[in-house]
Amino acid sequence: MTFASLRSFGFWSLVVAILTYMTLPTLVVLMTSVNPTEILAFPPEGVSFAWYEKALTYPDFRRAFTNGLIVTSLASTLAVVVGSAFAWLIHRYEFRGRGVLEAVLWSPLIIPHFTLGFGFLLLGGAFKLQQGYVMIVLAHMVLVMPFVTRAVYVSLATIDPNLARAAANLGASPFHVLTRIELPLVLPGMAGGWLIAAVLSLTEFTASLYVTGSRTQTLPVAMYNYIREYADPTVSAVSAMLIITTTLIMFIADRAFGLRRVLAIDTH
């Protein structure tokens, strides 16, 4: 076996090991969710879907899921509006402080979520908005906005600038160029960014733990409170449904909008 073959074998072995390490917890969750016993156990001793029924009918989970949908829809929509505006500003103009603005926009990807959650908790206390929907939506919007901004920025970068110039030469105003040329072309990036933001917001836990209350808790927080009192596989059933749902959403979004292109993973 040549050195090149050994290097290729070692590389792909490492890739397989990493993928296995990343997917094993998911497989364990899926398997424990159908365990018929009343305690979490692996491997499962049989197959039962009773815990899925309990997860779907448990009042706290249903209320938390409704709260999560409200927060997710508002936070994702606001993130698309604000993030698209920032992406357009950064892409279109050169100005002093542009690098600082970009660093601020990408900072939620680096700052730990518990730090941001604690900061919003203090901010909510200062304005007497703690544990209400306003602080939760703002916290989630800040956390997901980098992904929206990235998706929209990449979509703007792939637009042929000659299209806007041609429209302007034919007498189109800047407003018409924006609304009739650029906006339709960037809509897939905005839609893909919204879906990514929605998935991230719906499953956000760390920051939500600081800014939610008993009446506004989202599903991940309700799951955390549940496992503090119970040890049955109900939470595994909820996790399994979240895993399956988010996987389907991202698969459909990739087919519909081409997320690899939107996120600049594939430039073709």
Image (cartoon, rainbow, N blue to C red):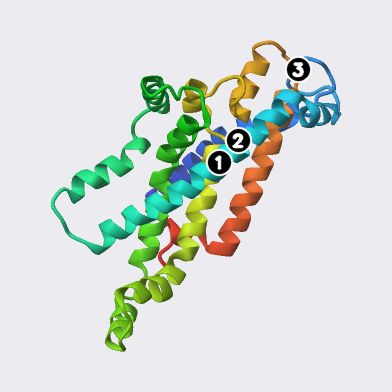
Residue 1 visible in the current orientation: no
User: In front here: 262 or 64?
Assistant: 64
Label 1: element kind: helix
Query: Label 3 sits on what residue type?
Result: Asp
Q: Secondary structure at mark 3?
A: loop
**Label 1 sits on residue:** 72
- The residue lying furthest to the top in this view is 229
Query: Could you tell me which residue is drawn at 53 percent across and 37 percent down?
Result: 17
Q: Nearer the viewer, mark 2 or mark 3?
A: 2
Question: Residue tagged by mark 3?
Answer: 232
Taking the spot 48% from the left edge, 53% from the top edge, the residue there is 193
Viewed as shown, does residue 28 lie left or right of 115? Answer: right
CA separation, marks 2 and 3?
23 Å
Q: Residues within 10 Å of mark 1 (few under 14, many from 20)?
A: many
Q: Is residue 242 visible?
A: yes
Which amino acid type is marked by label 1? Answer: Thr
Q: Earlier in the sequence, mark 3 or mark 1?
A: 1
Residue 54, x across and y down, in percent: 81, 26
Query: Is the C-beta separation of discs 1 and 2 under 8 Å?
Result: yes
Mark 2 or mark 3, which has the lower sequence index? 2
Q: Are marks 3 and 1 in contact (CB under 8 Å)?
A: no
Under mark 2, the amino acid is Gly
Residue at the (73%, 21%) spot, across then down: 42
**Which quarter of the picture shows residue 225?**
top right
- Dot label at residue 68: 2
